Image: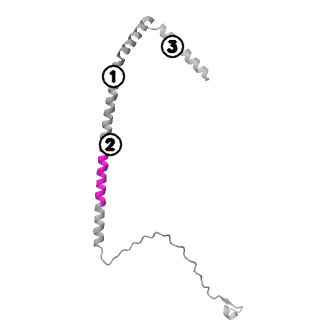
């Protein structure tokens, strides 16, 4: 459907709705206008009270939600600190246990640990000595390379 077709359909629907509303209205137009004006004046007179109520409610919600957020933050911090303390206790206990086990090892056992910070150097090429080659004669007897020369 084209854009102009949908706009014209919308306008036509609005006109039909307005016509049906006028035909079936429960009161004459002047009464309806008076009611609308009275309600608008009531709202206009009460707008300050409504605004004050709404702003007070907004401030109350803000402070309440801020307090809730601060409480939740403090609870999370307390849990983190408790977990950190438990972890430190476990690390200290494991360290003490490791020290005790090392102390129980016999004195004859020594452990040397060296830290190598350099990369290993490439192995140097070592010349390989060749073994003398044995050649066979046509009659099947083995002849060394020296004997032939």
Q: Which residue is mark 2?
A: 73
Say what secondary structure mark 3 lies in: helix
Q: Nearer the viewer, mark 2 or mark 1?
A: 1
Say what secondary structure mark 1 lies in: helix
Residue at (30% x, 64% y) in the render: 95
x and y percentages locating residue 48 in the rendered image: 35, 19
Q: Does the segment drawn in magenta span residue 77?
A: yes
How far apart in space, not on screen, are marks 2 and 1 (Cα)?
Answer: 31 Å
Q: Nearer the viewer, mark 1 or mark 3?
A: 1
Part of the protein shown in magenta = 74-91
Q: Does the segment drawn in magenta span residue 55?
A: no
Q: Which residue is mark 3?
A: 17
x and y percentages locating residue 142 in the rendered image: 66, 92
- 4 up-or-down from 78: above or below: above
x and y percentages locating residue 86 in the rendered image: 29, 55
Give 104 or 55, whichever is nearer the viewer. 55
How far apart in space, not on screen, are marks 1 and 3 (Cα)?
Answer: 38 Å
Principal SS element in the magenta part? Answer: helix
Colouring method of the image: one colour
Residue at (34% x, 32% y) in the render: 62
Q: Are marks 1 and 3 in contact (CB under 8 Å)?
A: no
x and y percentages locating residue 123 in the rendered image: 54, 76
Q: Which residue is mark 1?
A: 52
Whether residue 144 is visible, yes or no, is no
Q: Residues within 10 Å of mark 3 (few under 14, many from 20)?
A: few
Say what secondary structure mark 2 lies in: helix
Between disc 3 and disc 2, whose residue precedes?
A: 3
Between disc 1 and disc 3, whose residue precedes?
A: 3
Residue at (53% x, 12% y) in the render: 16
Image quarter hosting the C terminus: bottom right
């Amino acid at each position: 459907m084209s854009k102009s077709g949908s706009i014209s359909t919308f306008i036509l629907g609005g006109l039909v709705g307005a016509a049906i509303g006028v035909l079936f209205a429960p009161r004459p137009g002047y009464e309806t206008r008076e009611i609308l004006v009275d309600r608008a004046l009531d709202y206009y007179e009460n707008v300050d009270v409504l605004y004050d109520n709404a702003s007070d409610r907004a401030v109350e919600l803000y402070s309440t939600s801020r307090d809730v957020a601060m409480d939740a933050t403090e609870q999370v911090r307390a849990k983190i600190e408790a977990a950190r303390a438990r972890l430190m206790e476990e690390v200290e206990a494991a360290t003490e246990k490791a020290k005790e086990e090392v102390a129980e090892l016999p004195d004859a056992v020594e452990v040397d640990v060296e830290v190598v910070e350099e990369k290993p150097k490439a192995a140097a090429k070592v010349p390989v000595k060749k073994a003398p080659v044995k050649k066979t004669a046509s009659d099947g007897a083995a002849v060394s390379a020296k004997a032939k020369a």
